[in-house]
């Protein structure tokens, strides 16, 4: 049997979710990414992907630096889109959970399976280019 980790929380049963706050959070998060992040994404990624000139064979340290720089640049490029897409998934899951529990009574609550399902449903299918 697994032991619970040390925590200052003594009863997980008392944790409740404010559905209206979750709806507002999802809406605000999606709007912030759409209004504040997306408009700058193309400009930032274009500047970030500026190709540096090749280093001469007489300067192996610079060649090594440029190789590592390129790897980091590619990962950072991917992360800029992963942030946008992950934020969209998070906002979609929060919206889904709040919609499901909006009209429930005070004793109804989302369990872990409901939250996991909301995240699974929010992830676009491979090849789906849907964004915010």
Image: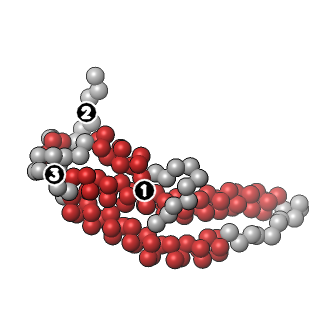
The dot on residue 32 is: none
Looking at the image, do the residues carrying marks 1 and 2 touch, with CB atoms under 8 Å apart? Answer: no
Between disc 1 and disc 2, the foreground one is 1
- Find residue 79 and report its image quarter: bottom right
Using the numbered discs, state the Cα–Cα distance from disc 1 to disc 3 in whole angstroms. 24 Å
Residue at the far top in the pictured view: 1
List x then y, in percent, for residue 64.
76, 57
List x then y, in percent, for residue 13.
15, 41
Colour treatment of the image: secondary structure
Q: Nearer the viewer, residue 23 or 57?
A: 23
Number of other residues with Cα within 10 Å of mark 1, as a class: few under 14, some 14 to 19, many 20 or more:
many
The dot on residue 4 is: 2
- Find residue 117 and report its image quarter: top left
At numbered mark 3, what does the secondary structure look like: helix, strand or loop? loop
Between disc 2 and disc 3, the foreground one is 3
Using the numbered discs, state the Cα–Cα distance from disc 2 to disc 3 in whole angstroms. 30 Å
List x then y, in percent, for residue 113.
31, 40
- Find residue 61 and report its image quarter: bottom right
Horizontal side of residue 118 vs 104, given as left or right: right
Task: Name the residue at 82% across, 66% down.
Answer: 54
List x then y, in percent, for residue 82.
52, 58
At numbered mark 1, what does the secondary structure look like: helix, strand or loop? helix
Q: In this view, does 126 lie above or below 31?
A: above
* Residue 65 shows in this picture: no
The dot on residue 104 is: 3
Q: Quadrant of the N terminus?
A: top left
Between disc 1 and disc 3, the foreground one is 3
Q: Nearer the viewer, residue 98 or 68?
A: 98
N-terminal-most mark, 2 or 3: 2
The dot on residue 89 is: 1
């Amino acid at each position: 049997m697994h032991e619970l980790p040390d925590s200052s929380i003594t009863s997980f049963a008392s944790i409740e979710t404010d559905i209206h706050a979750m709806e507002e959070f999802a809406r605000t998060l999606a709007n912030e990414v759409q209004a504040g992040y997306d408009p700058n994404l193309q400009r930032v990624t274009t500047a970030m992907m500026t190709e540096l000139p090749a280093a001469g064979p007489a300067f192996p340290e610079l060649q090594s630096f440029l190789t590592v720089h390129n790897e980091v640049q590619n990962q950072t490029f991917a992360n800029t889109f992963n942030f946008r897409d992950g934020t969209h998934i998070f906002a979609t899951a929060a919206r889904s959970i709040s919609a499901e529990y909006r009209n429930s009574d005070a004793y109804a609550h989302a369990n872990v399976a409901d939250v996991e399902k909301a995240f699974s449903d929010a992830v676009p299918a491979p090849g789906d280019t849907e964004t915010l």
